[in-house]
Amino acid sequence: QKKHKVAIVGSGNWGSAIARIAGQNTQRHSDIFEHEVQMYVFEEDYKGKPLSQVINETHENPKYLPGCQLPDNVVANPSPVDAVKDATMLVFVLPHQFIRSVCKQLKGKVDPNAHAISMIKGVEVKDGKISIFADVIQEALGISCSALSGANIANEVAQDKFSETTIGHRADAKGRENAELFFKLFDTPTFKVGIIEDVAGVSLCGALKNVVAIAAGFTDGLGWGDNAKAAVMRIGLMEMKRFSEEFFDGVKPETFTETSAGVADLITTCLGGRNRKCAEAFVKTGKPFDQLEKELLNGQKLQGTETAREVHELLAARGKVDDYPLFKAVYSIAYEGIDAHDLTSRL
Ligand code: NAD
Ligand code: 13P
């Protein structure tokens, strides 16, 4: 049987961490996977050299995952089309705002039998409709796409500190085959992959917990303590679940309460994520989020503020803003100049 060829579409903080695992596991399972793993790098200058060249020379991504050695079989490629050439397994791991433009470049250029997985934590809202990125990719490229999400702060995963993650797959036979292949590509003794038949639930958990993490960061900025943060997490989890059940058919309640993609990712992001960090700084400094993203994240991208805006746009279009008081408060504080002290006033 022909071996699978893997391409990682993305090379940021999480993209690089996951490329490292994929590179190790293609070597471990050399009966299933081809040796080389291509990794698409959005080209930029790094200290006078193209970043893709620096990665290939040093086997490290010094901009987005400094101090972490990538296996030699991970090959950086500045062309997305060239990176996915002949690939039968595609891993999408870009900040959500760049997916549409990359898919446009890839349309008609991928193997029609390829399997894809989305590791993107975000949603797309357009014309009063909401989509998960596994669906955006599946429709744009005509290939089966599942989702992977979990309590996975990239820097910890890159150091082989123990964590779990969740693959959410589609109900058909191709969906199950897809999940089993990606399980083989990612599961390690310190990165344990669980599988659930719920591509929407897994995707929505990953997107919506970022909005809750902004609220958790606000509580830190206000100095409100651990009880307040726990309350925000609890209320946030309820809103995440209710929102997902309201706008998507077939999401499973246990995805929210029992998987790494659900409650575990919510907790880790509210404790140690970038969204939390920037939201704390927002309260403490009064600077706008786009400025804090630039100052604090060195090119990495915040996903939660944009998701808060998109969720608000959808809820406003459906007349349901008041049904989700935590999501509403995050939007009002981030975008409408409402004082952060009002975070809990309508909960
Ligand atoms: P990141 O936040 O490090 O973002 C930077 C990446 O975006 C870089 O690779 C940069 O080259 C790229 N980029 C910038 N402009 C671009 C453009 N115009 N077109 C294409 N690419 C461009 O990225 P990340 O941490 O790898 O996040 C990717 C996704 O994974 C996000 O949805 C994120 O929520 C999710 N995620 C992140 C983590 C984490 O801990 N970092 C963990 C799990 C999931
Ligand atoms: P942040 O984007 O807030 O860092 O969250 C990372 C994450 O998704 C951890 O699972």
Image (tube, grey):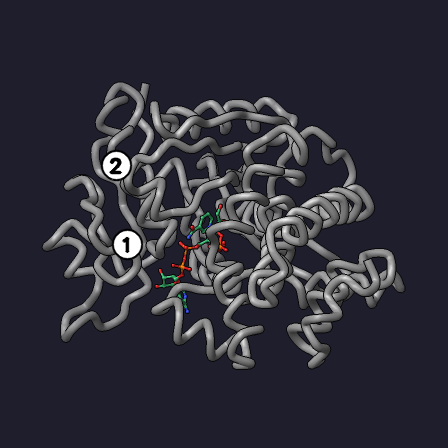
Residue located at (60% from left, 26% from top): 196
Q: Nearer the viewer, mark 1 or mark 2?
A: 1
Q: Which of marks 1 and 2 is nearer the N terminus?
A: 2
The residue wearing badge 2 is 23
The residue wearing badge 1 is 65
Label 2 sits on a secondary structure element that is: helix
Spot occupied by residue 263 in the image (x, y as percentages of width and height): 62, 38
Spot occupied by residue 170 in the image (x, y as percentages of width and height): 62, 31
Task: Determine the image quadrant of residue 327.
Answer: bottom right
Residue located at (40% from left, 37% from top): 89
Of 105 and 185, nearer the camera is: 185
Spot occupied by residue 237 in the image (x, y as percentages of width and height): 70, 44
In this rendering, would 61 be left or right of 192? Answer: left
Tell me the amino acid under the disc marked 2.
Answer: Gly
Q: Can residue 7 be seen in this view?
A: no
Tell me the amino acid under the disc marked 1.
Answer: Leu
Q: In this view, does 324 lie above or below 44?
A: above
Crowding at mark 2 (Cα within 10 Å: few <14, some 14-19, many 20+): many
Residue located at (10% from left, 55% from top): 57
In this rendering, would 262 be left or right of 54? Answer: right
Label 1 sits on a secondary structure element that is: loop
Q: Is label 2's Cβ within 8 Å of ligand 1?
A: no
